[in-house]
Amino acid sequence: MGGFFFARWLFMAINTYNNFVILQKKKLFTIFILFLFAIVSILIALGSDEEGLSFIPKFSSDMDNKIFLLLRLPRIAMAVLVGAGLAMSGTLAQAILRNPLASPFTLGISSGASFGAAISVFINVMSVWWTIVWAFVFAMATSAIIFGLARIKNSRPETLILGGVAVMFLFGAGTSLLQFLATEFQIQSIVFWGFGNLGRAGWTEVAIAAVCIIPPLPFALRLSWDLNALVLGEETAQALGVNYHALRLKCIALISLMSAAAICFTGLIGFIGLVSPHIARMFLGSEHRYLMPGAILFGVILVSLSDTLSRTIWSPQVVPIGILTSFLGVPFFLWILLRNKKEYWN
């Protein structure tokens, strides 16, 4: 009798293991398909211009070569970095706050950057680089506030979210005040910066953004096991040996650096940090070893395709990419609020 139960248990264990292996292979295959889609979206972005969509860039003259090397290529490289950085930031924010609506915008980092850029314009600092510096400084200052809240003993995720919302409204009010006091030219500059625009990117900006965004990505991936434990709850994670407070501080530091680097060079590109993790979660589940790469790839796809549309949908005018991502993100945001999708969140 005992042999029968042991054989049955062994059969169930082998069957469970086989199902687990099959599931992991499916997730890896899904990530591979997403990688191919990301490559295709980048190729479309590189080849498309005001004349329409294409996979192959035009090199019919020296001017075409210069446009591709000095304008188009750095623009798409920045799109890849911004998509990856914002998507990973959103994934980390949703994990440590255990809130499906968390993102760099929710934490107030984007509002801080916008306020910093507005100050730069208002005090007549006529330099794009100084605007970038001011935006980055205020984005990191906002992060420092959130970081300080996270260090408070026994602080809850709700504390960080409410603190981020409060900071977001504070900087939003500050930006509105500067617009009220600014000249017509300054108002135009502030509003244009807030729309989001990849056209500001050159190779220098791409290099600096890459230094701030690429190194944190593998470090964040190393935290996947701890984040998986955190999905089960703080007490369960601590019982499994996860230092929740240290993990939260690490994640906030990574979120701050990547999102600030992305926003300060491009302006506000909304909802990528919110939407990308959710779409990845639908296809790959909440296992962060697969969720993180999936979110990064979805971020790259969304930003690359949005940039392509921004350059071709109303040619020869270039629609700010922040407007297109908002059109994408707002309906999805409302859908998250109205539909309870716990089957892919938990």
Image: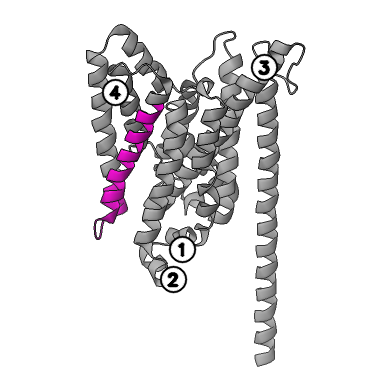
Where does the N terminus fall, quadrant-wise? bottom right
Disc 1 target residue: 229
Q: Nearer the viewer, residue 40 or 120?
A: 120
Amino acid at circle 3: Lys
The mark that comes first in sequence, 1 or 4, is 4
* Neighbours of disc 1 within 10 Å: few (<14), some (14-19), many (20+): many
Label 2 vs label 4, nearer the camera: 4
In the rendering, at what x and y percent does residue 318 appear?
54, 13
Disc 4 target residue: 119
The mark that comes first in sequence, 2 or 4, is 4
Q: Is residue 142 left or right of residue 34?
A: left
Tag 1–tag 2 contact (CB < 8 Å): yes
Q: How is the image coloured?
A: one colour
Disc 2 target residue: 240
Amino acid at circle 1: Ala
Amino acid at circle 4: Ile
Please tell me the numbered disc located at residue 200: none
* Residue positioned 51% across, 29% down in the render: 205
